[in-house]
Every structure is written in structure tokens, then in C-alpha cells.
Image: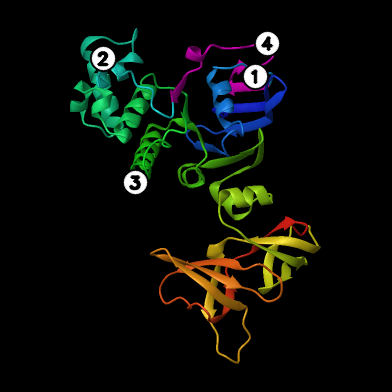
Amino acid sequence: MTRPALDITGLGKAFGPHAVLDHIDLSVEPGTVTAVVGASGCGKTTLLRLIAGFDRPDRGTIAIAGRTVADSSVFVAPHRRSIGYVAQDGALFPHLTVGQNIAYGLRGTLRGSAMNARVAELLETVSLDTALARRRPHELSGGQQQRVALARALARRPVLMLLDEPFSSLDTGLRSATRKSVSATLAQAKVTTLLVTHDQEEALSIADQVAVMRHGRFTQTGTPSQVYRTPADSFTAEFLGDCVLLPATVDTASAECALGTVPVDAGGVHGAATIMFRPEQLTATTVAADAEATGVVLASEFLGADVLLTIALPGSQPPIIVRQVSVDPPGVGRRVHVHVTGKAVVLGPPQ
């Protein structure tokens, strides 16, 4: 059985009376990417600092590639943990060239032509022209700087790569392109990676495993599809994307709600409950004047490929949002029937 590249058990950390992390358990398989996602202040950067060795945990165990690096009696220094670390701003040395920045991580291991060859190899690994080795960091774009920081972190062939909000300072278009480039580089190098971010889309798109953090605890850990499609609670559901929440009466495999009888993953829940759909699970179509309708279109927001429809439901139920392709959607004021794709998720008692 392959041992985890990173194994965390019962990890806790407090600063004074304030508990930042409370009983964190996490296992990361070799060669995979795990994203820890949560709002600012939830404890995700503290978790990264504990793994890197910048801070000591109050309790719990951290093991990297089967070697304990922190527990009640062991604390291995950061430079002896075989980790790479890329900070939010890249943290390149402004007075050094790109080549010298990358070579900084190789000091004491290579010299002369061997050093230059390794620097060139690393630049090619992160899809940068080797001619950039002579430039200073300020002469590069933000995305190029982040890739140089990644090359420097890869220089010593770390067992584990830690990425701390590495794309948050980039503009939207550059962030997406840099994220894809970095993801491809890490996959090609087969480097186990832990990424912390507050960007839900980033976490879902780049990771093999996603851990959602709230107030120093994980609310759910699983594949991107699992945490998005079948969230464990309403916080996880709403943090990871837009939700349609409806009161319902749940039976074994179905529920009665304002949309009619819909299939559900009941999870042992029976009776009154709140169920959840993602907006893209719903599609609205216009019905004839004498046909039964689910509701009426109150507003339509064109988003290019998609359109967001706000639909009023009968009674006191708040309007719902439906996301569907923008080709010939029902117009404002139209009576519509809302079709359901897939199953609803039962989140618990009525809210």
C-alpha cells in the first residue's frame, strides 16, 4: 500500500485564547493536488505554515512521505522537510536575475555549467524561454514571476509543494492562464501539491481533492465533484456555488416540493427538510396558457453562453434562480415549467 505524501492527524493550533485550527485530519496521496478552500481568516494559511515548519502545532502529527516532521516530541526544521513553497506574491529577490533566483535553491549542490543547465531545464519545465534567465523580476509579467517562483521551488525536487494563494494577485485573464500552466507543470513533474485558496472555482478546477474549511475545521473533504454535487451541509453547499434551496417533504428516494416530485439522495432523512439543487440542474420552458406552470419569469440576466432566470413560485416561496443556455430562453412574464436534471441533495431540517 502506497503511503500518503502528506498525512495530518488531530492537528490543532491556537494563538492566545483564539483557536485557529481544531482537530484537522488530512491525507494527500502522492502525485495529486489537494486544495484547501475557505474564507479569509478560516485558518488555511496557518495550516500551510504548520506543514512548512514556519510554526509549531499545539497538538497533532504531521508526516511527509512517511516521516514525522512535527508532533509532541519532534519538530523538523523547514529546510529539512523536502518541501517547495510558493507564496502569494512569488517572493522573488528583486536584486537577482531570474536565473540567479532559480539557482538560489541549488546553492551547495551544483556549480558552473551544471548549475546553468539545471536553471535552463527548470525554465523550460515552467514553459518560459531560457533567455529570460538574464532579466530581473520587475521585467516580467505577474504570471511569469509566479512561474519563476515555481521553478525555484521545484529546483530541489521537493516531495511536497505548498502553494499559498499563488494566483490571487493576478488579474482574471492572467490568473486563469497561469493556473493552467502551473497545474500542467506540476502534473508533468508528478509533484504532490497542497494549494490554499479562497477561490472556489480555482479549487474545483485544479484539484484532485478539495477540503472545505470553516472556523479552523474541515466541513467536508472529497473530490471536486463530490463536494460540489453532494455537499455535506448548507455552508459547504453555498460556499462552493449558487444554490436553489427549497422546503420539501422527503420520502425514501423522492421529495415533494414547489417543483413537484423530484428524486433525492435522502441519506436516511424522512419528513420535512430543506433540499438543494444547483441552478444548472434546472431548465425552464414556456408552457401554454391553459397548461399547469411551475412559476413565472420575473427577470432575465444574459451572461453570453448562459442566462440566469429569476422565477417566482406560487405562495410565499422566495423566487429561485435557474441557469440555462441562452439560446431562446423564456422571456420575462412568461409562465414556465421547471425541469429537473439529476437528484436534489437533502441538507437537513427546514431553514
The range drawn in magenta is: 60-86
Q: Residues within 10 Å of mark 1 (few under 14, many from 20)?
A: many
Instruction: Let me know if residue 77 is in the magenta part.
Output: yes
Q: CA distance from mark 2 to mark 3?
A: 34 Å
Task: Please tell me which residue is depicted at 54% across the width and 17% down the height of the picture.
Answer: 54
Question: Residue lying furthest right in this view?
Answer: 271
Residue 345: give x, y in percent of width and height.
67, 59
Q: CA distance from mark 2 to mark 1?
A: 37 Å
Q: Which quadrant of the view contains residue 282?
A: bottom right
Q: Which quadrant of the view contains residue 50?
A: top right
Front one among 148 and 336: 336
Helix or strand or loop: what does disc 3 sit on? helix
Residue type at mark 4?
Answer: Ser
Q: What residue sits right under mark 1 in the picture?
A: 57
Q: What residue sits right under mark 3 in the picture?
A: 173
Image: 303 above or below 78: below
> Is residue 230 among the parts visible in the rendering?
yes
Residue type at mark 1?
Answer: Pro
